[in-house]
């Protein structure tokens, strides 16, 4: 019997793959047979641990800040240099600089937009060219429910995450004829370093809105990426898959 979601022979690039959701996705893709490039911006040690856990020489680490000029092309080039092709792109790299709009600086706005939105554009643009040539590709971008319903104190983050949803739907229409799909995963409240600074009161307020009554784990998000990367998801494109425990129901 054929294994569902078999990714053997596929090569994946996961931006921001050293920690949190990115790490969980990298490990899950590797567990299903993919060769994985684990991108990181600052934490080389965490990226190396992730690659080592995938094991069998099927993963490498590549440094690069997706917000910087030329980084997107460099990451795709490094992926092809390591494994000969790129089949799966997971745009996961992201940052937050939370503040109320009246206090938010232009630098806080630009930092979040440049990484979460412009970085997604840069890496995707670079990856699409080889995907078009090989007439196969899976583009998966990690957004957030904040991009769907907004979140007070996160106008920059909500704008960027809403932006990648519109971006992905446009890309899906542009590349569909080349057997390339483009989809979004929108996690809800997930326990990562990014959410570790919330107070108990803030957590309790969020939990009141989550139907399943618990926070998510990075491992709750990763299977969605495996599915969207697989041949079984060949007829799914331009879709936003919420993985949020019932936080947002539309």
Image: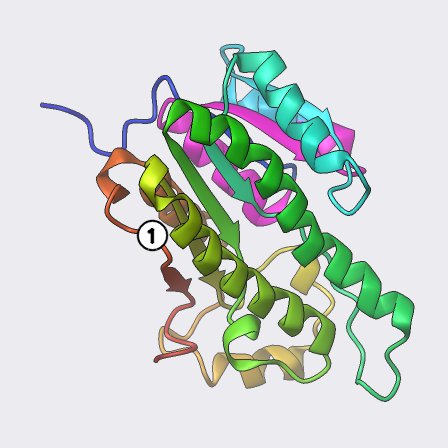
- Regarding residue 185, the answer to whether it shows in the image is no
Q: Position of residue 32 (x, y in %)?
A: 35, 28
- Most extreme residue toward the left is 1
Q: Secondary structure at mark 1?
A: loop
Residue 1 among magenta residues: no
165 or 129, which is in the foreground? 129
Q: Nearer the viewer, residue 10 or 152?
A: 10
Dot 1 corresponds to which residue? Answer: 237
Placement of 37 over or under 177, stated as above or below: above
Q: Is residue 23 magenta?
A: yes
| Colouring used for the render | rainbow
Residue 87 occupies quadrant: top left
To which quarter of the image does residue 191 belong? bottom right
Asked if residue 146 lies left or right of residue 63, the reply is left
Question: Is the residue marked by circle 1 packed among few (<14), some (14-19), or many (20+) residues within 10 Å?
Answer: many
Point out residue 99 in the picture as x, y percentages from the top left corner.
81, 78
Q: Quadrant of the N terminus?
A: top left
Q: Residue at x 63, y 49 (%)?
A: 121
Image: 108 above or below 154: above
Q: Quadrant of the C terminus?
A: bottom left
From the viewer's perspective, tell me whether residue 23 is left or right of residue 25.
Answer: right
Question: Where's residue 220, x and y in %?
Answer: 42, 53
Instruction: In this rendered view, identify the residue nearer to me: 181 or 210.
Output: 181
229 vs 75: above or below: below
Quadrant of the rendered image containing residue 107: bottom right
What residue is drawn where x is 50% and y is 63%? 165
Q: How many marks?
A: 1
Residue in the picture at 79% in, 84% down: 100
Whether residue 101 is visible to the viewer of this picture, yes or no, is: yes
Q: Which residues are magenta?
A: 19-47
State the image coordinates of residue 168 (x, y, percent, origin top left). Answer: 48, 56
Residue shown at the point (35%, 36%) measured from the top left: 178
């Amino acid at each position: 019997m054929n294994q569902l979601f078999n990714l053997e022979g596929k090569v994946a690039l996961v931006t921001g793959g050293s920690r949190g959701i990115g790490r969980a996705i990298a490990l899950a893709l590797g567990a299903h047979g993919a060769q994985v490039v684990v991108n990181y911006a600052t934490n080389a040690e965490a990226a190396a641990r992730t690659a080592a856990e995938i094991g069998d020489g099927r993963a490498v680490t590549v440094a690069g800040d997706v917000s910087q000029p030329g980084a997107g092309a460099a990451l795709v080039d490094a992926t092809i240099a390591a494994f000969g092709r790129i089949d799966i792109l997971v745009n996961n790299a992201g940052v937050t600089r939370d503040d109320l709009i009246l206090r938010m600086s232009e630098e806080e706005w630009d930092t979040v937009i440049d990484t979460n939105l412009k970085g997604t554009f840069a890496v995707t643009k670079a990856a699409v060219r080889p995907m078009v040539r090989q007439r196969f590709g899976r583009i998966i971008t990690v957004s957030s429910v904040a991009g769907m319903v907004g979140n007070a104190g996160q106008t920059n983050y909500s704008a960027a995450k809403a932006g990648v949803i519109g971006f992905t739907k446009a890309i899906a229409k542009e590349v569909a004829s080349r057997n390339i799909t483009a989809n979004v995963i929108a996690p809800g409240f997930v326990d990562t370093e990014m959410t570790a600074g919330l107070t108990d009161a803030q957590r309790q307020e969020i939990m009141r809105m989550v139907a399943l009554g618990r926070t998510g784990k990075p491992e709750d998000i990763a299977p969605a990426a495996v599915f969207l990367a697989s041949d079984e998801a060949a007829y799914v494109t331009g879709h936003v898959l919420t993985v949020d425990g019932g936080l947002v129901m539309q």
